[in-house]
Image (spheres, rainbow, N blue to C red):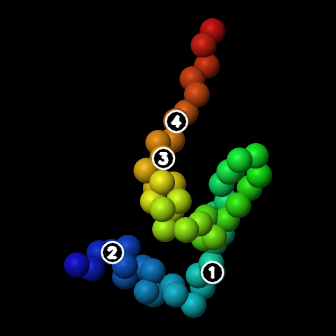
Amino acid sequence: MKTKTHKVLAENKKERSKCLVYTRVMGYHRPIESFNIGKKGEHQQRKHFEETIIY
């Protein structure tokens, strides 16, 4: 099923570039693309949180 997003991405394909996403692992930063299949799955299952300010 094609969506509006697919159409926009297809129309602007020439202007797009690869984006590297880094994450902190064991005290240093690594690009996610270098992860093995298991680690990529683990990363997708992570829950992100936002800290709240307590007065």
Which corner quadrant of the image does residue 54 belong to? top right
Looking at the image, tell me whether mark 2 or mark 4 is earlier in sequence order. Answer: 2
Residue 19 lies in quadrant: bottom right
Amino acid bearing label 1: Ser
At mark 3, the secondary structure is loop
Q: Which residue is mark 3?
A: 46
The extreme right residue here reads: 28
Sequence-wise, which precedes: disc 3 or disc 2?
2
Q: Secondary structure at mark 2?
A: helix
The span from disc 2 to disc 1 (Cα, nearest Å) is 20 Å
Q: How many marks?
A: 4
Q: Quadrant of the C terminus?
A: top right
Q: What residue is pinned by disc 4? A: 49
Q: Amino acid at mark 3?
A: Arg
Q: Which mark is on residue 4?
A: 2
Amino acid type of the residue tagged 4 in the rendering? Phe
Q: CA distance from mark 1 to mark 3?
A: 26 Å
Eye-nearest disc, 4 or 1? 4
User: Mark 1 touching mark 3, by CB under 8 A?
Assistant: no
Indicate which label's residue lies in the foreground, 2 or 4.
4
Near-viewer residue (20 or 1): 20
If the image is split into quadrants, where does the N terminus sit?
bottom left
Are discs 4 and 1 less than 8 Å apart at CB? no
Residue 40 lies, in percent from the top left, at 51, 62
Picture coordinates of residue 49 (x, y %)? 52, 36
Q: Nearer the viewer, mark 3 or mark 4?
A: 3
- What residue is disc 1 on? 17
Q: Residue furthest left?
A: 1
User: Residue 42's spot in the image, x, y percent?
Assistant: 48, 54
